[in-house]
Image (cartoon, coloured by chain):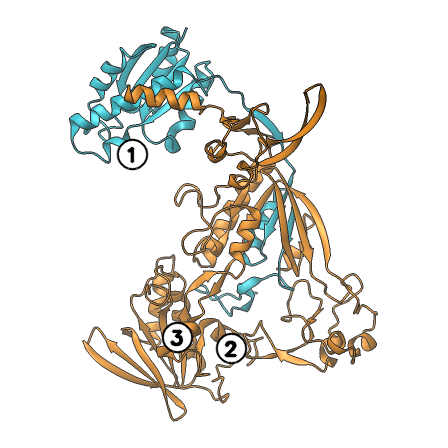
Amino acid sequence: MVAVAQHPNITLYSYSEVERVTGYIGNFTVTIREKAKYVDHDDCTGCGLCETKCPEKVKSEFDLGLGIRPAIYKPFAQAVPNKPVIDAANCRKLINGKCGVCEKICPVKAIRYDDQDRVFQEEVGAIVMATGYDLFPWEEAYGEYGYGRYPDVISGLHFERMVNASGPTGGKIKRPSDGKIPQDVAFIKCVGSRDDTKGKSYCSRTCCMYTAKHASQVMEKIPDGQAYVFYMDVRTAGKGYEEFYLRSVDQGAQYIRGRVSKIYPRGDRLVIKSEDTLLGKPIEVEVDLVVLATAMVPSAGSAEIAKIVGFSVDKDGFYQEAHPKLQPMETFTAGVFLAGACQGPRDIPDTVAQASGAAVKVAALLNKSELATEPMVANVDQSKCTGCEFCVPVCPYQAISMIPKKERAHGQVVERQVAHINKGLCQGCGACVAACRPCALDLDGYTGDQIVAEVDALCL
Amino acid sequence: MKRIGVFVCGCGTNIASTVDVDRVAEVASVMPSVVFSTSYKYMCSDPGQEQIKKAAEEHNLNRVIVASCSPRMHENTFRKAMSGAGLNPYMFEMVNIREQVSWVHSNKDEATQKAIDLIRMAVAKVERNKPLQVTTIPVTKKALVIGGGIAGMQAAIDIAETGHQVILVERSTTIGGKMAQLDKTFPTMDCSA
């Protein structure tokens, strides 16, 4: 992380979003909005004094609500950049003007309550999408697991925060309900994955492995602890993965093949009703904590940013690759590449490999001083164009714009609007040609004449 | 004067087992403007492409049709062969007699007839092809990476290491993404942050 921030060739815009992308391969113009941070990061030294004195405390998003953070905060100690921002929705000073503690105690006077969003424009030749994933919102779909009503039914990411030494529990596995160390912990795999009726049809690929890790951590960290893993299949396709899974079995994790049909409380514990399909009979296990291995889904807002950049998503909302085997890092939009879980569920090794692959594609593009463009593109006969603008919204690549054209009519010079094709953007799909009522548009290499000749050859 | 060469590919037996490629080549030879036609086992192979170059020279071809697989597979291969033969790469048409004929039909007579019909259409089209020229556009030597998780960070570093400028945009206040939230990671159990 620090290597990224320190690299002389990398400019980092944190707390920023891409608002608009125009142009085409080799020549994109990008508008970036940096949200108001209310802290001048040029002056701030990142000393952290403001965070200790801020009187407002809210649930930490980074710790998934397991811990708290002040209104002026860094999400975690090693954050990059290692400087805080003020969360305007929770800052007392910004809400009602009463407080201002951080401004008073800041030794370098870096607090700016009047800070505004800033908008930047950048020219780039290539774009890499790496927008990642979110976890499937199981609380909305799985009534049998309590719709999120039981505090001791958590997701795998909650568990990660707890076992993390710098997390909200200091690395201790604790029940969110009463802070007690659980003895028996159940893990349920494929929650939202491989479940057509409630979730997604696909396998999320990482859950078998992180659940093996979690089970192993329960066995290691909790004296006399017991991990139960409820699974459909154990999928360990990766180097060293099968061995890793078997290690968790050797450590005593109990793997039970069956879907959990119900979780309900009994006293302060949770009862899991399932079947053991290897024994062929229903079983019941009482545990202290339940960890759900929830599906990976595209991250919130990923469809919107795909629209802004101008490429397509698949049926599940993941970014559509140009070819599943031969072009897994490319989109159908030239110059836009994919890396990581935005294209489909994957683990860290696969993500790193794909990201490096995408980087090579980008480097190969940027190493060229000029790009050859495909000449099979649309052409406008401006004398025929009536300026109806039908073609403009039809174009999936935003390649058509209207330009003024001056011409003589009845002894006068008149100006009218006609369609203009940006040949860098046009991909030669022909959608505009079919939409053009006065037949002013034609596609080089696929003209109307040629198509009629083909039909004649077949039918006459 | 339009002089068309037609090359029918058997794709091993992928096409040849369902389409009578020799017959297709024979029928194509008498189509308008066709001055040469042949069939071959693998048109995409080096010797296959060499045939295009040789025939272009010997028969003074100025238009070429290859009936083989999907253009998504080998259109570029054959366009390059066109350039190699000194012809404009856009005076070329590809007819898909694999995905659209041999792989989806079982009756050999009907499949062969369909392949002939498709080639007849391509002949009519390629007669009207005009040489197109590739133009060039400049390249801004800078990349944008959207998302600062493990994927975005790795891509940014690797691009930056090739000497190009990178802009990394992250919507939250820190880079690291989901990975920064994780504890040790499988299978090597090293620290994620």
Horizontal and vertical percent position of residue A234: 31, 65
Left or right, B18 with respect to A385, comes to left
Badge nearest the viewer, 3 or 1: 1
Chain corresponding to orange in the figure: A
Left or right, B153 with respect to B66, comes to right
- Residue shown at 51%/68% (left/top)? B182
For residue A215, the mark is 3
- Gap between marks 3 and 2, in whole Å? 14 Å
Closest to the observer, A46 or A404: A404
Question: What is the three-letter code of the residue carrying label 3?
Answer: Ala
Vertical relation: A168 (above or below) A338? below
Left or right, A88 with respect to B11, comes to right
* SS under mark 1: helix
Determine the chain carrying the residue at label 1: B
Residue reaching furthest to the front: A410
- Gap between marks 3 and 1, in whole Å? 48 Å
Horizontal and vertical percent position of residue A136: 44, 67
Question: Is the residue under label 1 in contact with that under label 3 (CB below 8 Å)?
Answer: no
Q: Which residue is mark 1?
A: B99
Question: What is the three-letter code of the residue carrying label 2?
Answer: Met
Vertical relation: A123 (above or below) A226? above
Q: Quadrant of residue A322?
A: top left
